[in-house]
Amino acid sequence: MRIAVNDVTPETKRATIIGWVHEIRDLGGLAFLLIRDRTGIIQVTIPKKKISAEVLSVFKEISRESVVRIEGEVKEIEKAPGGRELIPSSIEIISKSESPLPLDVVEKVSAELDTRFDNRFLDVRRPRVSSVFKIRSCILHTVEDSLYKKGFTQITTSKIVGSATEGGTELFPIAYFEKEAFLNQSPQLYKQMMMAAGLEKVLEIGPIFRAEEHNTTKHLNEATSIDVEVSFADHFEVMKLLEDLIVEIYEEVAVSCTAELASLEINNLKIPVAPFPRLTYEEAIGIASGKLAEGANYGDDISTSAERAIGEEIGCHYFIVDWPTSIRPYYAMPYEDRPSVCKAFDLMHPRMELSSGAERVHDYDQLVHQIKEKGLNPDSFSYYLSAFRYGMPPHAGWGLGTERLVATMLGLQNVREAVLFPRDRHRLVP
């Protein structure tokens, strides 16, 4: 029976392992195979004069990244990975790999991003890369577990929609029989409708699509968004929910992913400290204006260079709050005494924006008015607006970018590295 590599100990005595040939070293009278599975790496030692001719014959046919089954005796050896080695009594090549490999799985030779993405199935075999996705899995599990314990209901909403979430041109049109349709930019409208349904606290983790013609290290055209919406809550309450969740995620990764962090050479994951600093939009613009030669103007969105300048000044996770109503979506709630400013916020990492949220407009007439103010037609949102006519509770929520969270936590230089199969302006396959 097969045993996982990391379950093989000197006390195991005999073991059968199945995995990929990570490395081959032939030193003449002595040869070594490093065999890798999802749990780790084990050394197989082949003393040629003591091994059967059959085993030796199979060894000579092995190529790197072939899948092999090896049975043998386990011995304790201090210098080997994990302090043990396997002396084979039998070797079987289950699936032979072609040579040369498109990229170096051992990571001695670096590969360009395009080469890595073109051969993603090989790229993820690299321990550093697989560690990213194991940590990403831990993050999403932590989100689900934490919010489930807080009474959230996980939902799944349609990704094929008949109208834009926020208007604009950043839409992927699709052929949907005889009708015009688009890939959804966000579950925003649907999760708000679930507030009218009485679920009160909802969570969705799912894909979102933005037809932005960016080609930067922080943009994707298909991303995974963590979305929540909470009834009877204001923007302060959901901001606290968000920052507490971020801290919990970091703490869980630090405890549960020690081997993966070590693989990424992260020896001490810095845990954010809540509460995070709160800057008003006006204060943020002031900081950027003082640091950038081109300045920053009130009423404009915050540019990448401005984000970087503010992040350098703050040096940790922080919120930008109290945005101009004119540059936020129609569903953001304005302050009653300052209608030009709304109860919206962005969660920022010093490198980039991670999340955007707000308290929402819950009054039907006010929402129709704000849709018109944005130059949109309320008739296009009739299915959404109907939920506000029959008792919509006050509510607030946010959306958090999974890939950006992973990239900033792990220091990845490009957000595409946090996606198995990234979709950007130029990449549609694999």
Image (cartoon, helix red, strand yellow):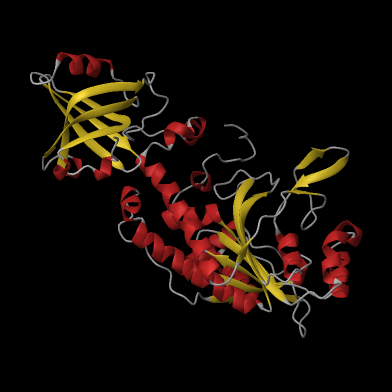
Q: Position of residue 272 (x, y in %)?
A: 43, 69
Left or right of 266, for residue 9: left
Residue 33 visible within the image: yes
Foreground residue, 395 or 418?
395
Q: Is residue 363 above or below residue 305?
A: below
Left or right of 276, for residue 323: right
Q: Is residue 227 above or below residue 403?
A: below
Residue at the image position 61 percent from the left and 35 percent from the top? 427
Q: Position of residue 278 (x, y in %)?
A: 56, 76
Q: Residue furthest bottom?
A: 337
Residue at the image position 60 percent from the left and 71 percent from the top? 320
Q: Position of residue 138 (x, y in %)?
A: 44, 55
Q: Report the quarter where the C terminus lies.
A: top right
Residue at the image position 58 percent from the left and 71 percent from the top? 151
Left or right of 84, for residue 272: right
Q: Image quadrant of residue 40?
A: top left
